Image (cartoon, rainbow, N blue to C red):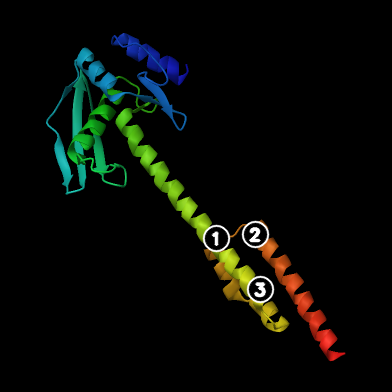
Amino acid sequence: MSANDKIRLVLEKYGEEFTEGQGGNVWRVQGTPVIAHKTLERIAAQAGITFDLPTILRSERDEAVILVAGKLNDRREWSIGEALVNVNYRVSGKQAAYVYAMAEKRAKDRVILKLVELHGVAFSEEEADEFKGQAGAAQSEQDEAAEAARRFIADCERAIDAEDDRDTLIGWWNGQGRKDSFRANRLTADEGKALAERVRQRAEALAAGNARAAA
């Protein structure tokens, strides 16, 4: 059974229509099904899910971590909701940051998904915001690393072209420091080969210049 089929069955069981896409109550983020928070709230009410008083595990100005437990018939589940501004909870402009409300929503939504047996099949809308933020942060780190590598390569190219001594150039290329710096900047094999070819061409040009001078 596909994820959409399972979600459809659960939603219909609790009186919710399955509407996918923009404006619907189910959509996808990075290929993962996401269910609207309000839809999950209505499912919880229809199913008769009850919640214990939440337990605050962490309370900071820009962060809240809350433990929530819920019950459906004889089943009990619990989960933790986290909200940390600019890490997994992003606000823009003058928008206020309601970290406790967000942490509670995430925890309750996870409990609901567990109790209706959709945990691992779909995320809630509030969870989607969290992993979108994590993906965005990861992408930002990758972009920064790629930009740092581009700057490093440009610096190497300038240094190679400016070197006037063949032995110094070859010594730098064969040295451990150069190898360590390539690893630190995560150069690809193709990028390393391109710089090796640049060194070879510069070394040949310097050797030819030295030969002409000697003649």
- Residue 29 — which label? none
Q: Secondary structure at mark 3?
A: helix
Q: Residues within 10 Å of mark 2 (few under 14, many from 20)?
A: some
Viewer can see residue 173? no
For the residue pair 200 and 71, the one nearer the viewer reads as 200
Residue with the mark numbered 2: 191
Counting residues from the start of the chain, the first of labels 1 and 2 encountered is 1
Residue with the mark numbered 3: 160
- Furthest toward the right, the residue is 215
Whole-Å distance between the Cαs marked 1 and 2? 10 Å
Q: Quadrant of the C terminus?
A: bottom right
Q: Secondary structure at mark 1?
A: helix
Q: Is residue 204 above or below residue 89?
A: below
Quarter of the image for residue 174 reads bottom right
**Amino acid type shown at disc 2:** Glu
**Amino acid type shown at disc 3:** Ile
35 sits left or right of 177 in the view: left
Residue with the mark numbered 1: 149
Q: Residues within 10 Å of mark 1 (few under 14, many from 20)?
A: some
